[in-house]
């Protein structure tokens, strides 16, 4: 029986965003160490731009013609692995496809007693873990710090902002549009917001950070990073999580012209990916589950339905049209 897959047609080179096609191919035969799954939810991530760009990165690019890589949650239908049984639920890297045959390596069982499958792709999944390690391990917010977070209403940013609040910091969020800023201020209790689509980030930071910035959680890079560097305090920290403003044309990505501030202000700037922290996932999961249960952190998801809508749904991320963690429910 044929299944539906989303494959790439070419590498992303900045010339077009239309690099995906829908195919209907038979499912592969199950071999030793593999499982057959039915995909339930797919995580739509800014990283998908990087995965389809032919450049050195933290993992090899998806080759044209391959099924697109994604994080997903799926139910096991058949198993030739001693680690998984039919009926189990798994998460990990899988293809954008309705069903598939996956190698057992890199897959993790999920427990539906704690949360729904989709939660393991959102606040209790990679997104939450990224916010947790980036903010706690690299950012190290302290009581009284002024912390700035960009793309603050998004999947990672909203959790990172709330972790900094729980640490006793004053948190200023930068986001695009009045709805996102109202969410940050009224629902998440941030101390200040900057709607970068309607005011200059420089003016907003000067208004909200009269004593400078102690910690910046960077999700966007580009001009915003440059503006923050001009206001960062002596021995400030910058956790570099992402640079989404630059993903459209990574061959011409902008570096901050005032990078010298890192030297003159003795700034600690550190990038990271979740790959650095895979052995500590249980720690992040326990923290986030506790925070979810006691209401310390609020999670928000934005769900699009139908695998055929993959490409248009992914594009929403780069237009700022997602309100929370963007997920694709494979079946309507
Ligand atoms: N290091 C890691 O391991 C890791 C893991 C996951 C994610 N990330 C990075 O973290 C960042 C956030 O990812 P996410 O999954 O949480 O996505 P998200 O914040 O839920 O969605 C992306 C948001 O970025 C903002 N954005 C889009 N284009 C922009 C532009 N040109 N300039 C400024 N902002 C723009 C939009 O919000 P506005 O409407 O507010 O502009 C959009 O909603 C990304 O840079 C991503 O690559 C890193």
Image (tube, rainbow, N blue to C red):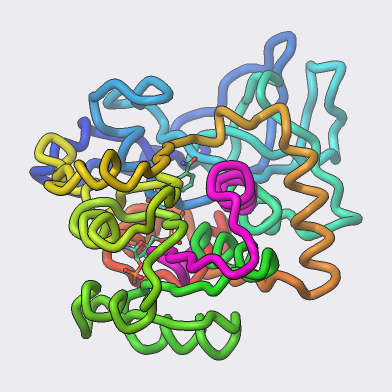
**Where is residue 254, by image quadrant?**
top left
- Magenta segment: does it hold 311? no
What span is colored magenta in the figure?
128-154
Q: In the rendering, at what x and y percent does residue 170 appear?
A: 54, 74
Q: In the rendering, at what x and y percent does residue 56 appear?
A: 29, 21
As drawn, the residue found furthest toward the right would be 113
**Tally of numbered tags:** 0
Q: Is residue 222 above or below residue 105?
A: below
- Magenta segment: does it hold 132? yes
- Judge by depth and name the residue closer to the eye, 25 or 213: 213
Q: Classify residue 213 as left or right of residue 299.
A: left
At horizontal 38% and vertical 52% (from top left) the residue drawn is 234
**Where is residue 28, by image quadrant?**
top right
Ligand 1 in which quarter: bottom left
At horizontal 51% and vertical 82% (from top left) the residue drawn is 191
Q: Is residue 273 above or below residue 62?
A: below
């Amino acid at each position: 029986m044929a299944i539906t897959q989303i494959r790439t047609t070419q590498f992303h080179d900045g010339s077009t965003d239309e690099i995906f096609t829908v195919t209907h191919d038979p499912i592969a035969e199950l071999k030793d160490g593999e499982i057959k799954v039915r995909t339930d939810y797919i995580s739509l991530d800014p990283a998908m731009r990087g995965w389809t760009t032919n450049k050195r990165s933290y993992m090899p690019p998806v080759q044209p013609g391959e099924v697109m890589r994604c994080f997903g949650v799926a139910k096991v239908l058949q198993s030739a692995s001693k680690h998984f049984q039919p009926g189990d639920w798994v998460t990990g890297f899988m293809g954008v496809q309705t069903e598939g045959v996956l190698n057992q390596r890199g897959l993790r069982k999920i427990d539906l007693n704690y949360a729904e499958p989709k939660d393991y792709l959102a606040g209790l999944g990679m997104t939450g873990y990224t916010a947790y390690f980036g903010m706690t391990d690299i950012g190290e917010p302290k009581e009284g710090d002024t912390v700035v977070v960009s793309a603050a209403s998004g999947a990672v940013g909203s959790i990172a902002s709330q972790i900094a609040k729980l640490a006793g910091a004053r948190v200023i969020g930068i986001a695009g549009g009045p709805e996102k800023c109202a969410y940050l201020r009224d629902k998440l209790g941030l101390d200040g917001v900057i709607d970068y689509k309607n005011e200059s980030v420089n003016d907003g930071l000067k208004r909200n950070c009269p004593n400078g910035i102690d910690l910046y959680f960077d999700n966007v890079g580009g001009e915003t990073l440059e503006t923050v560097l001009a206001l960062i305090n002596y021995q400030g920290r910058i956790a570099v999580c992402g640079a989404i403003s630059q993903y459209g044309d990574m061959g011409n990505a902008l570096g901050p012209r005032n990078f010298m501030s890192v030297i003159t202000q003795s700034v600690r700037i550190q990038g990271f990916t979740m790959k650095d922290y895979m052995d500590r996932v249980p720690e992040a999961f326990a923290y986030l589950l506790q925070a979810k249960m006691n209401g310390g952190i609020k999670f928000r998801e934005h769900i699009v339905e139908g695998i055929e809508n993959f490409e248009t749904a992914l594009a929403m991320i780069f237009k700022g049209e997602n309100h929370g963690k963007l997920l694709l429910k494979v079946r309507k």
